[in-house]
Amino acid sequence: MSATSVKAMASLALAVLSTCIWAFTDFSPISVAPIALACVILAVFALYDIRRSQGTLAGRSLAIGGICTGIGSTLIFLGLLPAVQKVREAALRMTLT
């Protein structure tokens, strides 16, 4: 039985953490996007290590999940940023009137 790559596990955990932080707190997407980007880089390193290990490391699916979640989170963060700004401005206008 081969050991699971710690980098792959950490990558997926960071991707989920960055998504949860953004979804459940009022941090701006720009402040959370570096975490999602870091998890993608970590996952790429994990895939490289897994390939070089000749079967002694597992966790390829975790690393791929980290890449997909990290990229998806980053695209959502950056795609929703203008919409979030518009909602905040509308809410501010409503409170001022």
Image (cartoon, helix red, strand yellow):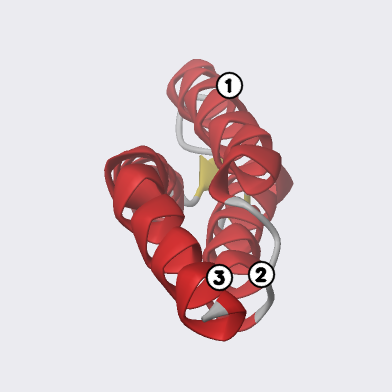
Residue beneath disc 3: 92
Q: Determine whether, in the image, residue 5 is placed left or right of residue 80.
A: right
Q: Which mark is residue 45?
A: 1
Image quarter for residue 33? top right
Task: Kindly report the distance in space between the C-alpha atoms of the residues bearing marks 2 and 3.
Answer: 23 Å
Q: Residue at x 38, y 67 (%)?
A: 87
Q: Amino acid at mark 1?
A: Phe
Q: Nearer the viewer, mark 2 or mark 1?
A: 2
**Local crowd size for mark 3, using a 10 Å CA cut-off: few (<14), some (14–19), many (≥20):** few
Label 1 near label 2: C-beta < 8 Å?
A: no
Measuring from the top left, give residue 61's x and y in whole percent: 34, 53
Circle 3: element type: helix
Q: Amino acid at mark 3?
A: Leu
Q: Determine whether, in the image, residue 17 is placed left or right of residue 70.
A: right
Task: Kindly report the distance in space between the C-alpha atoms of the residues bearing marks 1 and 3.
Answer: 44 Å
Residue beneath disc 2: 21
- In the image, 81 versus 16, the foreground residue is 81
Q: Nearer the viewer, mark 1 or mark 3?
A: 3
Q: Quadrant of the N terminus?
A: bottom right
Measuring from the top left, give residue 25's x and y in whole percent: 68, 77
Measuring from the top left, give residue 54's x and y in whole percent: 47, 25
Q: Determine whether, in the image, residue 31 is placed left or right of residue 85.
A: right
Label 3 near label 1: C-beta < 8 Å?
A: no
Tag count: 3
Measuring from the top left, give residue 27's x and y in whole percent: 70, 60
Q: Does residue 14 lie above or below 43 as drawn? A: below
**Local crowd size for mark 1, using a 10 Å CA cut-off: few (<14), some (14–19), many (≥20):** some
Of the two numbered discs 1 and 3 on the same chain, state the one appearing first in sequence: 1
Of the two numbered discs 2 and 1 on the same chain, state the one appearing first in sequence: 2
Of the two numbered discs 2 and 3 on the same chain, state the one appearing first in sequence: 2
Q: Nearer the viewer, mark 2 or mark 3?
A: 3
